[in-house]
Image (cartoon, helix red, strand yellow):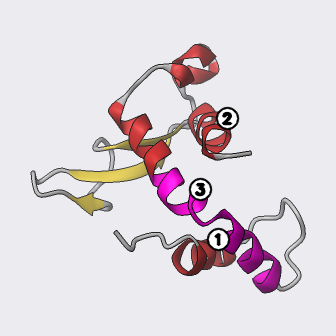
Amino acid sequence: AGCAASVRGHLLRNGWQVTTDGCDGAGLNTTAGDIWCFLQDHAPEVTLRPELVEEYDPAKDAMMLACERTLGANADRVAQFLIAQRNGTRAKERNELLTGAACREAACCGSR
């Protein structure tokens, strides 16, 4: 599964969004003074209207681009890192520390 499946099938369908609403001061400050963050809406409209996942929106496009430039461009490194560093984490089990480390160290998140 590539970025399209991950972003559309997992993130957007589960209510995750890049937004300037509800950030409460946390997130990325832009030169225009906006603060963007990544939030989950636990009752997203997309659950009632799944076709919304396919509609163009600059924020959705930003999620795709971010995925392609990090996970997509470094998929082999990320896979090898997760295998080497999982320390007993079972398949499909959450491990936020491992996820964060994989993003920073293997997928080069935050390097742009």
Q: What's drawn in magenta, residue-wise?
A: 66-86
Q: Position of residue 33 (x, y in %)?
A: 11, 54
Residue 102 in the figure: left or right of residue 34: right
Q: Judging from the image, what secondary structure is the residue with disc 1 in? A: helix
Q: Is residue 104 magenta?
A: no
Q: Is residue 104 above or below residue 19?
A: below
Residue 16 in the figure: left or right of residue 10: left
Q: Which residue is located at x 47 percent, y 19 percent?
A: 55
Q: Is residue 23 above or below residue 5?
A: below
Quarter-wise, where is residue 96 in the image? bottom right
- Mark 2 burial class by Cα count in 10 Å: few <14, some 14-19, many 20+: some
The three-letter code of the residue at mark 2 reads Gly
Q: Which residue is located at x 62 percent, y 75 percent?
A: 102
Q: Is residue 73 above or below residue 62?
A: below
Residue under label 3? 72
Q: Judging from the image, what secondary structure is the residue with disc 2 in? A: helix
Residue 9's disc is: 2
Q: Nearer the viewer, mark 3 or mark 1?
A: 3
Q: Nearer the viewer, residue 43 or 67?
A: 67
The three-letter code of the residue at mark 1 reads Thr
Quarter-wise, where is residue 51 in the image? top right
Q: Position of residue 83 (x, y in %)?
A: 82, 77
Mark 2 or mark 3: which comes first in sequence? Answer: 2
Q: Position of residue 39 (x, y in %)?
A: 46, 48
Q: Is residue 69 magenta?
A: yes
